Image (spheres, grey):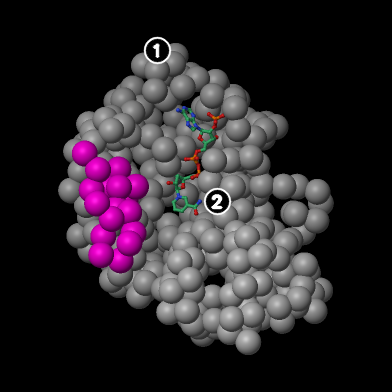
């Protein structure tokens, strides 16, 4: 197999490249050369997806059996459309890493692959009229933009030559956003640790290496493939934080504080206490079609242990615009803990 990985610089991209090389596949990566380090053994082409001349130059490096797109979290539908059009003559299949945020019901409703997706134009530019936050306070514009990018791929390659993969949240070694790394560092510090909501609340994060393996399994597939990627129900916020205490050998004490108290204090969900969502659809993602198609999801404790091992080797999440916004201020945490006794 010969594949093109759009991205490849950090987190999911390198995991895909590493796994593909281990399978004996030939790999080309395409990015601007700004983020992360290239994986040895892959051909690297540098360029910008927002520049048509770079895409034309890239296409000349083909053909490939499949394009694996891991680099469109910030791109507009128009840019993804341009990439798909430039690469379509040179690639058999397009495996697109999307997100569960494309569903209109996210994060409030249970989600299946046939749940309604945001209406979005395949050629929408970077600044479409913005939708207001939903009643739940969640901004729908990222999901709507990703829905437009999905459409751009399907309009160009056709559903039969496209895999649309919609993960919830991805964790694991190399996580640059700093969600699990923040909890691991907080556990390591010990003391009384503000733990959000209900310890028995289900969570469904997937491991970056499991996502990478499934992404690659899609490359030789034929026909329509649309899958949600979410861990089976069974993992909880409690098991996640306990695993953080265990692997860091921490004597910290988890102090569970109800959602309502945290919301009254104005805490930002998802980022100020990473991975904390109180919305009912967050842990109700139906990933059964992916499991039927061969997706495997390792136990969360393994993801936690391997991420700690990665941090302990001196690795740090790479500087990223989203990193700074993760984690609660220590004084604010202490104040809330004192207020609950
Ligand atoms: N992380 C999660 O929890 C999560 C959850 C659900 C879905 N996803 C999806 O998973 C995919 C991977 O996400 P991510 O956040 O790890 O990656 P990302 O930020 O979308 O992409 C990072 C990679 O893309 C390259 N890149 C970015 N802009 C580029 C451009 N204009 N031209 C060429 N290359 C460009 C970067 O390298 P350079 O900077 O060197 O160009 C880097 O290698 C995304 O599609 C995201 O929506 C992620």
As drawn, is 248 to the left or to the right of 341?
right
Secondary structure predominantly adopted by residues drawn in magenta: loop
Q: Is residue 79 visible to the viewer in this orientation of the structure?
A: yes
Residue occupying the point 24% across, 51% down: 132
Q: CA distance from mark 2 to mark 1?
A: 35 Å
Q: Is residue 227 visible?
A: no
Residue 1 rendering spot, x and y as whole percentages? 51, 37
State whether residue 172 is above or below residue 220: below
* Residue 277 on image: x %, y %: 44, 69
Q: Looking at the image, which residue is at 51% across and 59% down?
A: 271
Q: Quadrant of residue 92?
A: top left
Q: Which residue is mark 2?
A: 325
Front tag of 2 and 1 = 2
Residue at (43% x, 72% y) in the render? 263
Q: What are the residue bounds of the magenta stretch?
A: 129-145
Residue 312: image quadrant is bottom right
The image quarter containing residue 154 is top left
Residue 197, numbered circle: none
Q: Nearer the viewer, residue 324 or 63?
A: 324
Closer to the camera, 297 or 234?
Answer: 234
Asked whether disc 2 touches disc 1, contact meaning CB atoms under 8 Å apart, the reply is: no
For label 2, the SS is helix
145 vs 189: above or below? above
Badge 1 element: helix
Q: Nearer the viewer, residue 75 or 296?
A: 75
Residue at x 30% of width, y 69% of height: 108
Q: Nearer the viewer, residue 322 or 55?
A: 322
Q: Which residue is mark 1?
A: 53
Where in the figure is residue 82, as x and y percent of width and height? 31, 25
């Amino acid at each position: 197999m010969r594949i093109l990985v759009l991205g490849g610089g950090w987190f999911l991209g390198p995991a895909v490249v590493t796994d593909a090389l281990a399978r004996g596949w030939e790999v080309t990566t395409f990015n601007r050369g700004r983020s992360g380090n290239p994986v040895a053994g892959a051909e690297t082409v540098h360029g910008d997806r927002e520049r048509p001349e770079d895409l034309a130059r890239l296409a000349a490096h083909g053909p490939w059996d499949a394009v694996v797109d891991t680099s469109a979290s910030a791109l507009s539908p128009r840019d993804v459309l341009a990439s798909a059009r430039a690469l379509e003559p040179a690639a058999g299949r397009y495996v697109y890493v999307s997100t569960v945020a494309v569903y209109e019901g996210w994060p409030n409703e249970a989600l299946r692959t046939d749940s309604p997706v945001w209406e979005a134009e395949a050629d929408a530019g970077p600044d479409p009229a913005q939708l207001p936050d939903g009643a739940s306070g969640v901004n729908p514009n990222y999901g709507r933009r990703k829905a437009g990018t999905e459409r751009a791929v399907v309009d160009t390659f056709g559903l039969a030559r496209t895999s649309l993969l919609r993960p919830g949240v991805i964790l694991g070694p190399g996580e640059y956003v700093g969600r699990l790394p923040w909890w691991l560092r907080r556990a390591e510090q010990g003391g009384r640790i503000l733990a959000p909501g209900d310890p028995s609340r289900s969570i469904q994060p997937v491991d970056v290496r499991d996502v990478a393996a499934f992404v690659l399994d899609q490359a030789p597939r034929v026909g329509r493939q649309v899958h949600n990627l979410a861990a089976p129900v069974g993992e909880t916020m409690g098991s996640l934080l306990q695993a953080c205490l265990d692997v860091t050998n921490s004597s910290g004490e988890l102090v569970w504080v109800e959602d309502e108290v945290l919301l009254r204090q104005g805490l930002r969900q998802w980022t100020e206490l990473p991975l904390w969502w109180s919305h009912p659809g967050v842990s109700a993602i139906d990933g059964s079609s992916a499991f039927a198609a061969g997706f495997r999801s390792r136990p969360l404790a393994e993801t936690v242990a391997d991420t700690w091992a990665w941090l302990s080797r001196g690795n740090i999440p790479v500087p990223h615009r989203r990193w700074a916004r993760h984690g609660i201020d220590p004084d604010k945490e202490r104040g809330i803990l004192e207020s609950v006794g």
